[in-house]
Image (cartoon, helix red, strand yellow):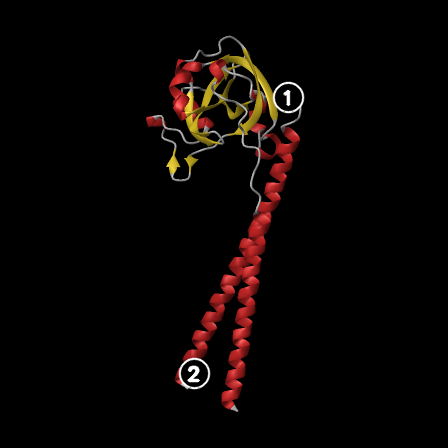
Amino acid sequence: MKFRARSHWIRGLLLLLIAAVVVGLVALGNWQLRRLDWKLDLIERIETRVGAQPVAAPPRADWNEIERRRHEYLRVTTRGRFLHEHETLVQALTERGGGYWVLTPLRTPAGEILLINRGFVPSEALAQWRRAERPVGEQRITGLLRLSEPGGIPLRRNDPAADRWYSRDVDAIARARGLAGAAPYFVDADAAPNPGGLPVGGLTRLSFRNAHLVYALTWYGLALLLTAMTAYAVYRERVDDADVSG
């Protein structure tokens, strides 16, 4: 009798554990559906905005109102003079291989500072780019408004003291370069040619893998399979117990 009671206790604990796993699998499926909604909304925003006529980059008076859903990937235009002495190189991996984004502050006629991602320089062309002339005088920049990428990337944190950057962290770069009052966003410049062909603009990533529905169905399928297997195991156990009792 004691052994049987202990067996029932273990069986109940196992069923609770299985139920918790099923709940967890369903929760993962629900999370993937939410991610699917987010990804579809992002794709729609990008497709709508990148081909639109550019609007003026948000001025200082609007900086506190900037938010991801309303402004990210908005096509904007601005003008000003580059502060090349405050350039920052951010490590990057693009369709052209490994290299660096070139972030250069732009001072507008209103005295505002905007970080401009002028484009990509491959690692092997870095020395060539350093020797190239820089655009001087007032420049007009058109590109996509992007929001700050704070902290770095997984396993690699930005290190301002060592001047090592793995993400385009606007606030941290502005502090490191002494750029007081910089805008809370940066602009990915379009593919307009730069002196010597470097850096290469217009490389903003605009296509995103969307497998969230497949992932959701996988999690739901695993939950259904585990539930069915458990139900069958319970059924067989009761049939076997009935046979033994008979």
Classify the position of the N terminus by image quarter. bottom left
From mark 1 to mark 2, how far is it between C-alphas?
Answer: 76 Å
Q: Foreground residue, 51 or 81?
A: 51
Image coords of residue 44 (percent x, y): 64, 36
Q: Amino acid at mark 1?
A: Val
Is 16 above or below relative to 89?
Answer: below
Q: Of the numbered discs in the image, which one, if any, rests on residue 20?
A: none
Is 62 above or below relative to 39?
Answer: above
Residue drawn at 40 percent across, 17 percent down:
128
Categorize mark 2 by other alpha carbons within 10 Å: few (<14), some (14-19), many (20+). few
Of all residues, the one furthest to the bottom in this rendering is 246
Q: Amino acid at mark 2?
A: Arg
Q: Foreground residue, 2 or 62?
A: 2
| Label 2 residue SS | helix
Disc with the residue nearer the chain's start (1 vs 2): 2
Residue drawn at 50 percent across, 84 percent down:
241
Residue drawn at 51 percent across, 58 percent down:
24
Q: Which residue is mark 1?
A: 55
| Label 1 residue SS | strand
Image coords of residue 63 (percent x, y): 56, 25
- Number of on-image labels: 2
Residue 92 relative to residue 73: left or right: left
Image coords of residue 231 (percent x, y): 55, 72
**CB within 8 Å, label 1 to label 2:** no
Image coords of residue 196 (percent x, y): 47, 14
Q: Which residue is mark 2?
A: 4
Of all residues, the one furthest to the top in this rendering is 137
